Amino acid sequence: MKRAALALAAALLLQIGCRTLPSQVVQLAVDDPRPHALLAAWSARAAELRSLRGSARVSLDGAHGASFARQLLALERPARLRVEVLGLLNQRIAVLATDGERYDLYRSESGAVESGEMRPSVLWEVSGVPLTPEEAVGVLLGAPQMQRPGGEITGAVESPDAGVRFEIRGSDLYWTVLEFDAQELLSGYELAGPEGTLFQVRYRDYREVAGTRFAHRVELDFPFSEVHAEVRFGGVQLNPVFPESIFRLELPERVFSPPGESPE
């Protein structure tokens, strides 16, 4: 009952918020085809994005201060991930690898490799980012997972710049918010529930990569942990084929080299 009441209150607040900005957004008619068309096109594109190899500049700002690092990334759906954190001279400071079932963590200060069964909180414990590996893979690919695929589209509005925003609600108390810009590219994603917004993602700086537009700047906000993160990609390769060994840690000289230019 308490969760249901909180969900109702959140929905009412959302509706009130929309009504306080009548000059900025326009409510779309229930039979407007744009939300369904945008969702179908995005879902089809998201299904084609399976893996990524790239370099990035990652910055974090939270209760414990601000930091940034250059990283090499390898990721593959649904939850396979490798992150190499580099120092000023391109030396490895830390490496985290997971095949979705187990993880390996190397820290240069100890020279040791910690291994264990994968748990959802590993990224939070290691890097201060409160995402599961599966969520992180989807977010960085520009194709975050839907909370309830096939749910009902509600609350569709059009912004002054011709962008479209709508919610997807299922049978539970959590919902997904998607926002597309005038070029029909995903510009925002939000996962919310009775307690409020769990996390928000903004996609910026789309560039051509292998015949598709890919966001080279990803901004993330986590209201509960008060963390803001930003990922600026340098070189990016989409849908590479990785050897199985890349997601377990044996520390070869270099598993891969970052494609293209260095991150800004």
Image (cartoon, rainbow, N blue to C red):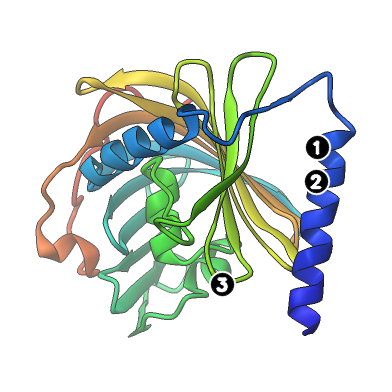
- Residue closest to the eye, 178 or 153: 153
Residue type, numbered disc 2: Gln
- Residue closest to the eye, 144 or 52: 144
**Circle 2 sits in a helix, a strand or a loop, which is it?**
helix
Packing grade of label 2 (10 A; few <14, some 14-19, many >=20) is few
Whether residue 85 can be seen here = no
Rendering coords of residue 260 (x, y %): 27, 24
Whether residue 192 can be seen here = yes
**Circle 3 sits in a helix, a strand or a loop, which is it?**
helix
**Residue in the image at 59% along x and 39% along y:** 166
Rendering coords of residue 44 (x, y %): 27, 39
Task: Quickly name the residue at label 3.
Answer: 125
Could you tell me how far apart the alpha carbons at marks 1 and 2 are, in whole angstroms?
Answer: 5 Å
Task: Quickly name the residue at label 2.
Answer: 15
Residue type, numbered disc 3: Glu
Q: Earlier in the sequence, mark 1 or mark 3?
A: 1
In the displayed structure image, the side of residue 170 where residue 117 appears, left or right? left
Contact between labelled residues 2 and 1, with CB atoms less than 8 Å apart: yes
Task: Quickly name the residue at label 1.
Answer: 18
Reply above or below: 27 against 200.
above
